[in-house]
Amino acid sequence: MADLKEFAEQLVNLTVKEVNELADILKEEYGIEPAAAAVAVAGGAAGGGEDAAEEQTEFDVILKAPGGSKLAVVKLVKELTGQGLKDAKALVDGAPAPIKEGVSKDEAEALKAQLEEAGAEVELK
């Protein structure tokens, strides 16, 4: 069993070039048609892709600049963060500063839209 697990791990970690070479070898030396080789290619490519590019799930909403209507931005930051007026003003004055950290993509985009509507420059990280 250990040999099969090792073999499977090697298959999953193949590069695209190596998968193509494997498909050619299977076709030329063993008579396996490309359709069967495509299954091996898809399995190898999917395994490698997961490690290379994981989708980001948590975002930070960063206030880059308060823009022209600083008072509206301070009020909105106060409302969005639940901070007092003094703390919200300090956060806006200290831009660039994080407004919220580790939020979902939908929440981050909603916060960004609200802040931009109030005139602020916002960035998602």
Image: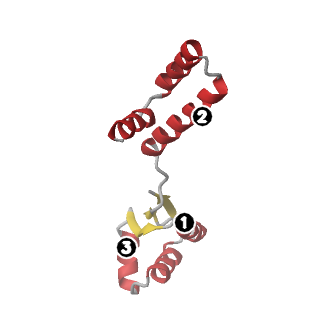
Instruction: Give how far apart the Cα atoms at labels 1 and 3 are.
Output: 16 Å
The percent position of residue 22, horizontal first and vertical second, equals: 50, 21
Please determine whether, in this image, residue 118 is positioned above or below residue 23.
below
Residue 116, quarter of picture:
bottom right
Along the line of sight, which residue is nearer the eye, 82 or 68? 82
Q: Do the residues bearing badges 1 and 3 touch, measured as CB atoms within 8 Å?
A: no
Q: Which residue is mark 2?
A: 39
Q: Image quadrant for the C terminus? A: bottom left
Q: Could you tell whether 99 is left or right of 24 in the image?
A: left
Q: Do the residues bearing badges 2 and 1 touch, measured as CB atoms within 8 Å?
A: no
- In the rendered structure, find residue 112 and report the number of the disc placed on it: 1
Q: Closer to the N terminus: mark 2 or mark 1?
A: 2
What residue appears at the point 39 percent right and 78 percent down from the top-left corner?
89
Say which amino acid is labelled 1.
Answer: Lys
Please determine whether, in this image, residue 81 is positioned above or below residue 95.
below
Label 3 CA crowd tier, 10 Å (few <14, some 14–19, many 20+) = many
Label 2 CA crowd tier, 10 Å (few <14, some 14–19, many 20+) = few
Q: Closer to the N terminus: mark 1 or mark 3?
A: 3
